[in-house]
Image: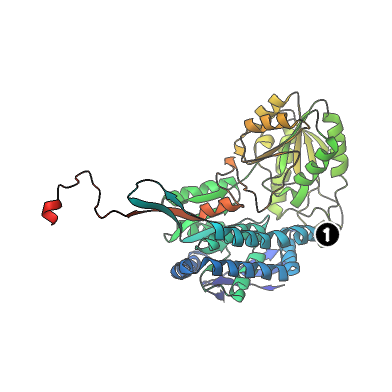
Amino acid sequence: MSEYKMMINGQLVDAVDGKTMDVTNPANGEYVATVPCANEKDVELAVAAAKAALPGWKKTYIGKRAELIFALANKLHEHAEELAKLETVCMGAPISKSLAFDANAAPGNLEFIAGAGRAFYGNTISANPNAQVMTIREPLGVVGLITPWNFPMTTATSKLAPALITGNTVVLKPASCAPLSCLKIGEYAKEVGFPDGVINVICGPGSTAGEAIVKHKDVAKINFTGDSHVGKRIMYLASEYVKPVASELGGKNAFIVLEDANIAAAVETGVYSAFFNTGQNCGSPSRFYIHEKVYDEFKEKFIAAAEKITVGDTMDPKTMMGPLAYMGARDNAEAMIEEALKDGCKLLSGGARPDTPETKNGAYLLPTILEVYDNKIHFMQEEIFAPVVGFYKIKSAEEAIELTNENDYGLCASVWTEDFKKGMRIIDQIDTGTTWINQHLEIVTETPWGGRKQSGWTKENSAIVLEEYTYQKHVWINLSDEPHTFWEGFLKDIIK
């Protein structure tokens, strides 16, 4: 393809030191593009540009901010096919997924927040009859956005939109292996008229560029989506500056199938949500707790459906599942499968690489299903981020609740039952940030998304996210002719 540049202060630039990184296609290992490799010097320039642009952007009429965000959304719609191809060649998603999902979700995030942000209000407080008391929502300042490779531009726009509409300026760092669509967003922002410095996009390793953003004294907040271990590192670094960190981290999500479930619906949604995007979704279910009365039926139908998934050429519209995003991710998944088998699990399906000419050089792994007999093994406790799931037979809903909560993560879970009262009682006892009844992985921009425990504690999407990028400034206006103090009248004669 070609060389890409970063966007700093409205200019397309190389890294200060001239260093670059190659982006490769995980489907075949072939070269895709060369991008700058930023370090602390580049971060310094990007943050300085964002800081200089902040006063003017904060004072920009919110309607004008919304207009620019809508214009950026339209630009993404215009370039949907190009952006979808960039997503596919960078991280391996099938082109059908990139076109149908990412190319619509990314501008959709911008459009929703551009409208919702204009109705974001402060409050008045009845604190004193002789005063007008209120809270004003203020932007935090320069915000650092560090985004993952599994949904590059969709995650980026879910953070950019609320940061921008509330008056912040941003430094965006996408994942090193999949930065191209985000670099294009930086270019489009310039084209539609965003002031220089409001949106800065750099790329480089998390250990250098990412940590430099986190530690920079002029960055007011970090919003990070990614691995829980990296999230902990970011929180540790930010704590030195008492800097808030919004974190949307990993998950080890439960899919609970009770004896009265609609098995056909549960199987279809289970297969889709487990293997969509090659299982590289923090909300994908990887722990299936299935009631013993329907276990055999569910298992048989699930395996049959999973084995029909078309794995192959990512540019073929008929392909349903592509490779993992890089070879290391495939290697990690294979190591966890091997460990699970040593821990007593039984391989029901998959567990190997597809043996076809078109997949031999890529980071491919077939949809994999394990039968599990011990909920405490590493595989059932740790996120795998791959197309690998475990089936565990349960005797009751109470057991499912206990097993679901027996985990350090708390992102999401689903319950499959035709008894909605029972389903609600179960959900009330599940310690996760998102829950579904007879659905899984239904995540839309209008609804909040985020977890509990080691899955993070903040929210993405919905109007709630606007609170993540502002602080409340308390304002007290005295309406009386005289000040009120506990020493009232004591200094009156002296002052006169």
**Front-most of 421 and 89?**
421
| Vertical order, 295 against 235 (above or below) | above
Q: Few, some or many C-alpha atoms within 10 Å of disc 1 (few <14, some 14-19, many ≥20)?
A: many
Whether 136 is drawn above or below 169: the answer is: above
What x and y, as percent, mark residue 206?
56, 57
Judge whether residue 205 can be spotted in this image.
Answer: no
**What is the count of numbered marks?**
1
Quadrant placement of the N terminus: bottom right
What kind of residue is marked 1? Asp
Q: Which residue is drawn at 31% across and 55% down?
A: 479
Who's the residue at 53% across and 65% down the image? 62
> In x, y percent, where is residue 349?
83, 40
Element under label 1? Answer: loop
Residue 335 found in image quarter: top right
* Residue 247 to residue 153: above or below: above
Question: Measured from the top left, where is residue 122 in percent x and y?
Answer: 47, 54
Front one among 357 and 419: 419
Left or right? Give the position of 374 relative to 310. Answer: left
Name the residue nearer the viewer: 360 or 366. Answer: 366
Looking at the image, the residue that sits furthest to the top is: 395
Quadrant of the image containing the C terminus? bottom left
Pick the front one: 43 or 460: 460
* Residue 182 visible at all: yes
In the rendering, at what x and y percent does residue 16 appear?
51, 72
Q: How is the rendered protein coloured? A: rainbow
Circle 1 residue: 313
Q: In this view, does 263 lie above or below 488?
A: above
User: In the image, what residue occupies the spot 84% across and 34% down?
Assistant: 298
